[in-house]
Amino acid sequence: MAMSLNQLTRAIAPKPPRILIHGVSGVGKTTFAAEANQPVFVQTEDGLGTLPSSHFPLARTYEDVIDALAALYTEPHDFKTVVIDSVDWLEPLVWGKACRDNGWASIEDAGYGKGYVAALNLWRQYIDGLNALRDDRGMTVVQIAHTDIKRFDSPEHDPYDRYVIKLHTRAAALLQEHSDVVLFANYRISTVKADVGFNKKVNRAMGSGERVIHTAERPAFLAKNRYGLPETLSLDWSTFAQAMPPAIQSLLAAPQSVTATPTPT
């Protein structure tokens, strides 16, 4: 069918953001997500600890994750944020599903990276489920990931190390592409020159324990945002929500007091 100007539309209300946060171990990524607006966790690892957040039983298969997303889509509830904790623990479940579907003993059995390409179809199905919750149920999406340090071969500069999402390269690129915000969480670190004698000085790292999130990409880490956020914010959900555009803030602001919703069984 031919396109026509009569088919033009304009967005009336902004959609909730799709957020991907990665960072160093123990920095507080799960706590950050637990402070969101009425969150429910889909767990692929037992990272909640004692945090009083509603969550599904620990997912042990890819199907468990998809079933949880389907329940949030079809059943009545008051949750406003879906949290996946974490996507790098989801990855082995994706590979397991790909292997069962194709009769492989491991994801490497397909040869020449074909197993990882097949896994991308499952990742896209998962992303479709998240997008449906966002578009049709008005839910903010938060995906949590651990971070890894990998060498980056720049076409313009000498190679250097950087923090990246701890996923296969293809899967990481897909999730980044389908996220409105990619945050890198770390401790704020500064360096000072220290005299070690013999007229020699070395750089020493100094840290106060302050935890921050970076919202824009730098050589040392992956990050991005589509909202014009400050480059660095405190690792705190309310601070992050207040930095978002006014039309988005109301979608992210957690109510002051919420009656606990029973944990799904």
Image (cartoon, helix red, strand yellow):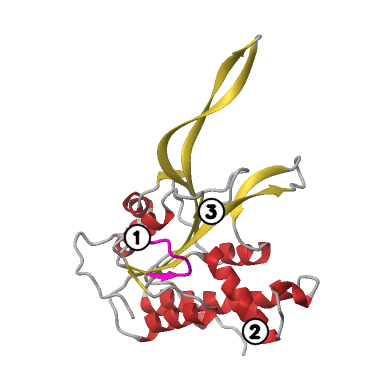
Label drawn at residue 100: 2
Give the label on residue 189, or none: none
Q: Earlier in the sequence, mark 3 or mark 1?
A: 1
Quarter of the image for residue 194 reads top right
Query: In the displayed image of the protein, which residue is found farthest to the bottom?
Result: 1
Q: Quadrant of residue 253?
A: bottom left
- Determine the residue positioned at 51% across, 48% down: 24
Distance, label 2 to label 3, CA atoms, is: 35 Å
Disc 1 target residue:
34
Q: Of discs 3 and 1, which sits in the foreground?
A: 1
Helix, strand or loop under label 1: helix
**Crowding at mark 2 (Cα within 10 Å: few <14, some 14-19, many 20+):** few
Q: Which residue is found at the position 48% from the left and 69% from the top?
A: 44
Q: Tag 2, which secondary structure?
A: helix
- Taking the magenta stretch, the answer to whether it contains residue 126 is no
**Which amino acid type is marked by label 2?**
Arg
Q: State the residue position of label 3.
A: 224
Please report contact status of discs 2 and 3: CB closer than 8 Å, yes or no. Answer: no
Q: Earlier in the sequence, mark 2 or mark 3?
A: 2
Q: Residue at x 19, y 69 (%)?
A: 259
